[in-house]
Image (cartoon, grey):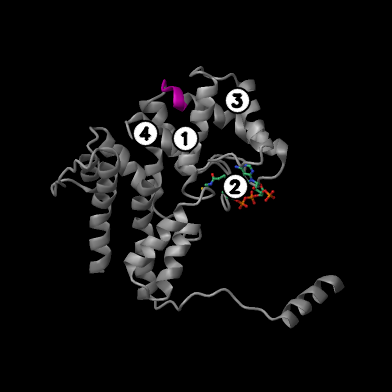
Amino acid sequence: MKMVLNLLAKLPGIAAFIYRLKYKNGELIESDSKLDLGGNFAHMMGIKKPYDDVARMYFILHSDHESGNVSAHTGHLVASALSDLYYSISAMTNGLAGPLHGLANQEVLAWIQGVYKQMDGKIPTEAEMRQFVWDTLKGGQVIPGFGHAVLRKTDPRYMAQREFCLKHLPNDPLFQYVDLLFKVVPPVLLEQGKAKNPWPNVDAQSGVIQWYYGLKEYDFYTVLFAVGRALGVVANIIWDRGLGYPIERPKSVTTAMLEAQAELKVNS
Ligand SMILES: CC(C)(COP(=O)(O)OP(=O)(O)OC[C@H]1O[C@@H](n2cnc3c(N)ncnc32)[C@H](O)[C@@H]1OP(=O)(O)O)[C@@H](O)C(=O)NCCC(=O)NCCS
């Protein structure tokens, strides 16, 4: 328990340290112990209000939600070998860094920026945006920020951030791109007929909010994501230990077992 509290207390400071070291000439800002986790993070990042509220929303929305995703599952898996919490959260973060998972929030922004450049900053028409989406698909890429392994409707975390954008940055050009993608992408993915879920996920909205409040270094976004994700993953690891969960291992099967399965299929 002490290790969990230490880790959670230190993570925002570590993330802000990385940011200030990499992008702000190493000019660090002391933490302020009177502030809450989100408020202190905004303070150490050197970003003014209302970024403290953005940080609070971001960390809560990005905490683990159901344990089965790559990062949450990896954290749980590594902890199941009784590796300590620091190793488990470091493994979790490495899982998060894949483009089909957490890195998607950075990829969305890079992709939108690409469209933005091509359009010379002009908001595309629906037809132009549809064409960009098709070009991306035909180039063999996925549309970042859309689809989900489990959800079969618009991600509620997307909707929470969309409502925030409609309230605080409705005229921001990048938000207008995201808003347009919300209309254009699902019908295209349905027409393509591959994705089981054509609706947007959490990553389609988060980068735009960070960008608007001045956090434009999008290769930092996965670090940010990791701070939030850790909140849920460590809670689950505490339960794993409390309930005495065993080490996790996928089932092994022999060739004879596979042959028996294949026979069952052929005969059924
Ligand atoms: C999240 C994701 C990895 C889930 O993958 P999954 O469980 O395999 O999803 P599905 O079962 O719907 O995939 C079926 C097919 O649709 C494709 N597909 C799914 N989402 C797609 C998207 N956003 N753009 C294009 N194709 C997509 C898959 O690549 C797969 O194609 P294949 O049969 O040629 O391999 C996938 O939707 C994706 O790559 N999304 C974009 C990346 C992203 O936003 N990740 C963050 C998720 S929170």
Percent position (x, y) of residue 173?
Answer: 45, 22
Mark 4, other Cα within 10 Å: few <14 / some 14–19 / many ≥20: some
Q: Nearer the viewer, mark 3 or mark 2?
A: 3
Q: Is mark 3 within 8 Å of ligand 1?
A: no
Mark 2, other Cα within 10 Å: few <14 / some 14–19 / many ≥20: few
Q: Amino acid at mark 3?
A: Met
Q: Residue 64: give its label.
A: none
Q: On the rendered structure, is 54 left or right of 252?
A: left
Q: Are marks 3 and 4 in contact (CB under 8 Å)?
A: no
Mark 1, other Cα within 10 Å: few <14 / some 14–19 / many ≥20: many
Query: In this figure, which residue is indicated by the disc labeled 1?
Result: 109
Mark earlier in primary sequence (2, 1)? 1
Q: Main secondary structure of the magenta part?
A: helix
Q: Nearer the viewer, mark 2 or mark 1?
A: 1
Q: Residue at x 85, y 71 (%)?
A: 266
Work out how far the residue at label 3 is from the one at label 2, CA to CA, in angstroms.
24 Å
Query: In this figure, which residue is indicated by the disc labeled 2?
Result: 152
Disc 4, SS: loop
Query: In this figure, which residue is indicated by the disc labeled 4?
Result: 216
Mark earlier in primary sequence (4, 2)? 2
Q: Residue at x 25, y 47 (%)?
A: 17
Mark earlier in primary sequence (3, 4)? 3
Q: Residue 129: give its label.
A: 3
Relative to 63, say whether 217 is above or below.
above
Work out how far the residue at label 2 is from the one at label 1, CA to CA, in angstroms.
23 Å
Q: Amino acid at mark 1?
A: Leu
Q: Find the magenta span and give its range.
A: 171-175
Residue 131 image-quadrant placement:
top right
Magenta span includes 121: no
Percent position (x, y) of residue 137?
Answer: 66, 37
Work out how far the residue at label 3 is from the one at label 4, CA to CA, in angstroms.
23 Å
